[in-house]
Image (cartoon, rainbow, N blue to C red):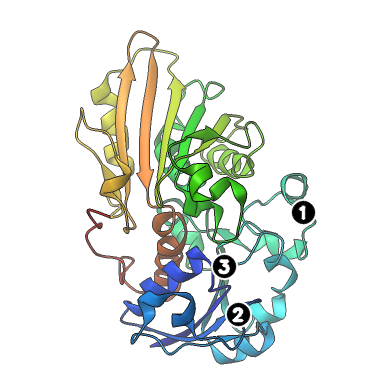
């Protein structure tokens, strides 16, 4: 049994993480922190924990936590984690950061999309925690950069094609939709019920911060620099990411050939579900789960592969993936605490 701390437990991702950790057989959630709810009971913020949790929010003290727990989960706003994580802390405890501070290896790229980085030397040591791609690196680090939600769905959808010479890597377009929990629990006019309900909109067009994260990881697989178009949309649902990706082929390929590539690539991956031919993912079939569903299509008229991926943004796109990373770090079966059927209806 290990002890864990969740720093920034008052947000949606932090709450989802605690929900999953409470169901994990090898974990004791010993500490939760918050900047605004110090000394308040957790079940006052989230009534679903009534008679389940006696946790009380405390102030974040990373030095103290590093002496008391085995792993610290950081669910903090972008730009905060890099200013509180130090090498001294990593010498004593494992850190899994659900934010963006350690996801992008190139500090110039990070700072052009986010803010000034507070611990540049640690970027070289952080491992991008997409388990299906970086499993061997994850088990040998003390700091994991948990991927973003849009990025998880997009990268898993496209990864099997990135080393193929017959794919036009300059043609990649990702059209993605997210539920409103992706914007966090803080007050924002754009996510108020009357603003988001009965509407769908594109936002941060040609400027979304997940773009360089997707590009960096796909470039690593491709062995060349990738530039792509990524457009996110807000849809009036609580949970879910649906990403539709388009990639042109340089030569004709059959759907059977494309399927065989994906089947081989993901043959040992429990949390990636390749749907049968003719079926495409729906967010309702992955809600509350750590699965990523992928559907494949070819438009022979334009010689374009159309890949559709779906995840729950709070689970595989955040908290579930963090638990999956924790399982790898401690040598447990990767699906421990995550092996359950998606919720339906919800």
Please, which residue is most extreme toward the right here?
116
> Is residue 331 shown to the viewer in this render?
no
- What is the distance, in whole Å, between disc 2 and disc 1 at their CAs? 26 Å
Does residue 205 lie above or below 168 as drawn? below
Q: Earlier in the sequence, mark 3 or mark 1?
A: 3
Does residue 67 lie above or below 42 as drawn? below
The residue carrying mark 3 is 75
Q: Earlier in the sequence, mark 2 or mark 3?
A: 2
Q: Quadrant of residue 230?
A: top right
Could you classify mark 3 by the number of other residues whose Cα lies within 10 Å: few (under 14), some (14-19), or many (20 or more)?
many
Image quarter (top left, top right, bottom left or bottom right) of the N terminus? bottom left
Mark closer to the observer (2, 1) = 2
Q: Relative to residue 120, is residue 272 drawn left or right?
A: left
Q: Earlier in the sequence, mark 2 or mark 1?
A: 2
**Which label sits on residue 37?**
2
Does residue 313 lie above or below 332 as drawn? above
Q: Relative to residue 35, is residue 265 drawn left or right?
A: left
Near-viewer residue (109 or 195): 195
The residue carrying mark 1 is 115
Cβ atoms under marks 2 and 3 closer than 8 Å: no
Near-viewer residue (120 or 38): 38
Could you classify mark 1 by the number of other residues whose Cα lies within 10 Å: few (under 14), some (14-19), or many (20 or more)?
some
Task: Residue 250: give x, y in percent of width and height.
Answer: 45, 14
The secondary element bearing badge 1 is classed as loop
Task: Residue 280: give x, y in percent of width and height.
Answer: 27, 33
Image point 42% across, 43% down: which residue? Answer: 156
């Amino acid at each position: 049994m290990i002890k864990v701390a969740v720093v920034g437990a008052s947000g949606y991702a932090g709450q989802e993480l605690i929900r999953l950790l409470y169901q994990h057989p090898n974990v004791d959630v010993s500490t939760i922190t918050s900047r605004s709810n110090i000394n308040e009971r957790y079940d006052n913020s989230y009534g679903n924990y009534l008679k389940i949790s006696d946790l009380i929010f405390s102030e974040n003290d990373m030095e103290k936590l590093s002496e008391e727990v085995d792993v610290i989960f950081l669910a903090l706003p972008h730009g905060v984690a890099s200013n509180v994580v130090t090498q001294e802390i990593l010498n004593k405890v494992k850190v899994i950061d659900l934010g963006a501070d350690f996801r992008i290896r190139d500090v110039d790229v990070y700072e052009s999309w986010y803010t000034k980085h507070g611990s540049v030397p640690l970027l070289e040591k952080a491992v991008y925690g997409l388990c299906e791609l970086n499993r061997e690196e994850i088990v040998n680090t003390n700091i994991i950069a948990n991927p973003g939600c849009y990025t998880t769905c997009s990268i898993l959808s496209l990864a099997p094609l990135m080393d193929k010479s017959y794919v036009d890597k300059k043609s990649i377009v990702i059209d993605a939709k997210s539920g409103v929990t992706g914007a966090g629990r803080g007050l924002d006019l754009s996510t108020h019920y009357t603003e988001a309900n009965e509407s769908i909109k594109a936002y941060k067009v040609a400027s979304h911060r997940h773009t360089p994260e997707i590009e960096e990881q796909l470039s690593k697989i491709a062995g060349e620099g990738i530039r792509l178009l990524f457009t996110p949309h807000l849809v009036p649902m609580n949970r879910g990411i649906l990403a539709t990706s388009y990639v042109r082929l340089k030569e004709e390929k059959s759907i059977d050939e494309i399927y065989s590539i994906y089947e081989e690539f993901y043959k040992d991956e429990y949390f990636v579900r390749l749907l049968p031919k003719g079926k495409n993912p729906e967010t309702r079939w992955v809600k509350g789960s750590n699965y990523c569903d992928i559907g494949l299509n070819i438009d022979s008229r334009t010689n374009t592969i159309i890949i559709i991926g779906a995840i729950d943004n709070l689970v595989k796109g955040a908290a579930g993936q963090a638990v999956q990373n924790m399982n790898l770090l401690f040598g447990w079966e990767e699906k421990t605490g995550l092996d359950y059927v998606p919720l339906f209806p919800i």
